[in-house]
């Protein structure tokens, strides 16, 4: 049984909505982040090195060039002909609304770009930006807002220097849904001080607030981060592949089937990844999750 038979995946959901494969194309639009430029904090989250985002998101070329190069790679690899412009690097709502509109318009003007996915923080989604995104939705574009929450535990959020609380996330979610936007929340599995129970609690709290999509990610230790220093000093112990797979399976079982998994793991490039080494093997992780669910005779939502 393929992964899609156990889990509601983004790829499968887009295929059934549009009748063909739809892929996200990562874009670096030159933003910064309030947790780096001093308005919320400096230094950013303890695990963040933005080079760990998709390779295509590293260059800050014009948006049309980034989409052109990304689409030719994806078209060759997957046969995809239609795309969602994924504003991924840093905080993609952190600018004045009119400039944001220009950038989003630029992406949507490209033929075969059918929508937007906007990555941002819970404390950075003012109403005028949500209004712009709602207008795209009303025009028939596929629009997602991706909120990095990572954990629902304030103690952890403080420990990793996120610069926002779970209460701020809840307030943001209420406003995002007022604008009828689809929300995809990001959670990290393996944050310092957290175990299986904390991850499941975070999932349950996120589901309670209402969410249309989820992204799960193992915590990567990458070069140039505070987390890398903690790892070198053996203050942080990365999770095993087995522990990650089992926890993700536990979370999937507790997720209602209508919630779409945009991602179940994440990779970092070899030149910056320090640990755990297994997270560079995306397919090994995904196959492991599939096998785990198969062995359990389980599917998404079985424990809801
Ligand atoms: S992870 Fe996101 S919020 Fe944290 S510092 Fe990096 S860009 Fe900013």
Image (spheres, grey):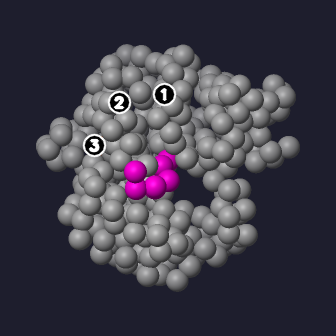
* Front residue of this view, candidates 5 and 168: 168
Q: Position of residue 242 (x, y in %)?
A: 66, 24
Specify the quadrant of the image occupied by residue 15: bottom right
Quadrant holding the C terminus: top right
Which residue, given by chain and number where applicable, does mark 2 sit on?
A: 166
Specify the quadrant of the image occupied by residue 192: top left
- In space, the residues marked 3 and 2 are separated at their CA atoms by 10 Å
* Front residue of this view, candidates 282 and 215: 215
Which residue, given by chain and number where applicable, does mark 1 sit on?
A: 205
Q: Position of residue 227 (x, y in %)?
A: 35, 29
Q: In the rendered image, is residue 25 in sight?
A: no
Q: Secondary structure at mark 2?
A: helix
Q: Position of residue 244 (x, y in %)?
A: 61, 27
**Residue sitting at 60 percent across and 35 percent down?**
278
Q: Secondary structure at mark 1?
A: helix
220 is higher (above) or lower (below) than 271: above
Which residue, given by chain and number where applicable, does mark 3 sit on?
A: 123
54 is higher (above) or lower (below) than 123: below
Q: Is residue 216 magenta?
A: no
Q: Is residue 180 magenta?
A: yes
**Label 2 lies in ligand 1 vicinity (Cβ under 8 Å):** no
Quadrant holding the N terminus: top right
């Amino acid at each position: 049984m393929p992964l899609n038979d156990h889990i509601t995946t983004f790829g499968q959901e887009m295929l059934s909505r549009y009748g063909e494969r739809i892929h996200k194309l990562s874009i670096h639009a030159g933003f910064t982040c309030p947790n780096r430029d001093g308005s919320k904090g400096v230094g950013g989250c303890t695990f963040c090195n933005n080079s760990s985002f998709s390779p295509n998101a590293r260059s800050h070329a014009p948006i049309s060039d980034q989409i052109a190069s990304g689409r030719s790679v994806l078209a060759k690899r997957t046969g995809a002909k239609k795309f969602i412009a994924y504003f991924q690097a840093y905080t993609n709502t952190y600018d004045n609304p009119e400039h944001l509109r220009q950038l989003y318009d630029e992406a949507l003007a490209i033929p075969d770009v059918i929508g937007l996915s906007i990555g941002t923080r819970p404390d950075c989604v003012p109403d005028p930006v949500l209004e712009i995104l709602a207008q795209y939705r009303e025009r028939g574009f596929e629009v997602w807002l991706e909120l990095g929450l990572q954990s629902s535990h304030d103690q952890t959020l403080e420990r990793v220097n996120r610069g926002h609380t779970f209460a701020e996330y809840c307030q943001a979610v209420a406003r995002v849904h007022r604008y009828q936007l689809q929300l995809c929340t990001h959670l990290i599995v393996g944050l310092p001080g957290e175990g299986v129970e904390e991850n499941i609690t975070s999932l349950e709290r996120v589901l309670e607030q209402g969410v249309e999509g989820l992204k799960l990610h193992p915590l990567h230790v990458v070069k140039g981060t505070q987390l890398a220093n903690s790892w070198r000093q053996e203050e942080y112990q990365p999770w095993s592949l087995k522990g990650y797979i089992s926890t993700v399976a536990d979370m999937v079982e507790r997720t209602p089937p209508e919630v779409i998994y945009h991602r179940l793991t994440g990779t970092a490039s070899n030149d910056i990844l320090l640990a755990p080494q297994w997270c560079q093997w995306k397919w090994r992780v995904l196959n492991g999750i599939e096998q785990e669910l198969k062995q359990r005779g389980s599917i998404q939502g079985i424990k809801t």
